[in-house]
Amino acid sequence: MLSEADIARAVSVLRAGGLVAFPTETVYGLGADAANDAAVQKIFAAKGRPHNHPLIVHIADVTHVATWARDVPPAVHRLAQRFWPGPLTMVLKRAAGVSDFVTGGQQTIALRAPSHPVARALLARFGGGIAAPSANRYGRVSATTAGHVRQEFGDDLDFILDGGATDIGIESTIVDLSRDRPSVLRPGAITERMLEDALGAPLAPPDRASPRAPGMHARHYAPRTPLMVMEADLLLELASSLVRQGKRVAVLARSAQQPLLQGLTWIGAPADPGGYAHALYADLRRLDAAGCDAILAEAPPGDMEWAAVRDRLTRASAGGV
Ligand code: TXA
Ligand code: MG
């Protein structure tokens, strides 16, 4: 169990310009004082992340929005009321004085008020904004436990707040509110339907003028083992033919039943999108660690509730569905 003393220690590390990994309800974040450029630069160095990739600034609640953003539309308050604290990131026009380090040089800023009690305690006690990407090396699978964070960074971090396994398991939904019509830049647990319901208006599809969300690069969230996504029947066929050729195959199944085959590492994923997302990154890490020649993942269903899971699997497979 974490204590007040752990939170206090994390806050002093942040104040001193250090890095603290902390749990959120989505994935673990790698945090630094968002107002301290030198501290923010340490995040890029630790992750090996390109400098033009903007970070999400985590805030305690909607009253902090005005510190970071300007021309804040009424939709922000509507969405904050419904979904904050929670797994929703809002992209807004950045306020004057917000540093290029946090925003990757863009004219927008991404803000999120997380709901995890440890993140909330940290933000309340720290008082300012905490810039935090997911706590993984660039392009790799996000961390959903403190153990994953240690696997990623070893002793490179100043402090890790261990809040156990995260609840949702995949990153927040990102909605762009910096232009006339809101649009979703990254799907997450809060679906387009939930956003449209709260906004009382349809979302626009993102277009070429949308703010860049560089985490949306095709290959991302990727294990080291090559991963392919396919329907169950093809998966079973391919798995047995690869095994017959002497290859070692890891499978992330959903509906498919495990065949009697030597040389298969098999995980049956939960049948509902929430359970699937919760387990996804830990599953990918386990399959990756099995040292197989390939990971075959069964394609998720096509409906909106599965959009975020589909997105992460597609990126983990470098786009080859
Ligand atoms: O659930 C989450 O969002 C987690 C936890 C730690 O809060 N954070 C997270 O951060 O996923 P990161 O850095 O791994 O992904 C942030 C995404 C990136 O794709 C980045 O490009 C996008 O947000 N982003 C950040 N600022 C942006 C901006 N101003 N405009 C457009 N996209 C932005
Ligand atoms: Mg990330």
Image (cartoon, rainbow, N blue to C red):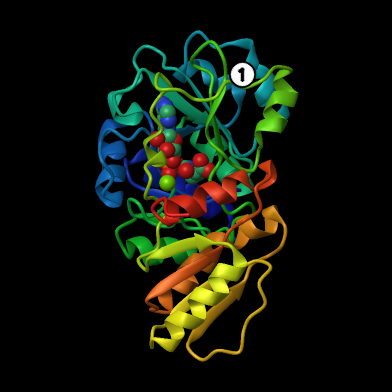
Image quarter of residue 269 = bottom right
- Kindly identify the residue that appears in the image at 48 percent across and 51 percent down: 314
| 64 left or right of 316 in image | right
The outermost residue toward the top is 71
How busy is the neighbourhood of tag 1: few (under 14 within 10 Å), some, or many (20 plus)?
some
| 136 left or right of 201 in image | left
Depth order, front residue of 221/91: 221
> Does 163 appear above or below 286?
above
How far from the left and from the top, in percent, is residue 299?
Answer: 58, 58
| 29 left or right of 153 in image | right
Q: Is mark 1 within 8 Å of ligand 1?
A: no
How far from the left and from the top, in percent, is residue 129?
Answer: 46, 31
Depth order, front residue of 250/69: 250
> Does 93 appear above or below 170?
above
Q: How many marks?
A: 1
Q: Quadrant of the N terminus?
A: bottom right
Image quarter of residue 151 = bottom left
Image quarter of residue 267 = bottom right
- Kindly identify the residue that appears in the image at 56 percent across and 14 percent down: 181
How far from the left and from the top, in percent, is residue 65?
Answer: 53, 20
Q: Can residue 117 be seen in this snapshot?
A: yes
How far from the left and from the top, in percent, is residue 44?
Answer: 28, 43
Q: Amino acid at mark 1?
A: Val
- Kindly identify the residue that appears in the image at 53 percent across and 53 percent down: 5
| 283 left or right of 18 in image | right
Depth order, front residue of 311/281: 311
Q: Can residue 132 be seen in this snapshot?
A: no
Q: For numbered disc 1, what is the local secondary structure?
A: helix
Q: Which residue is mark 1?
A: 76
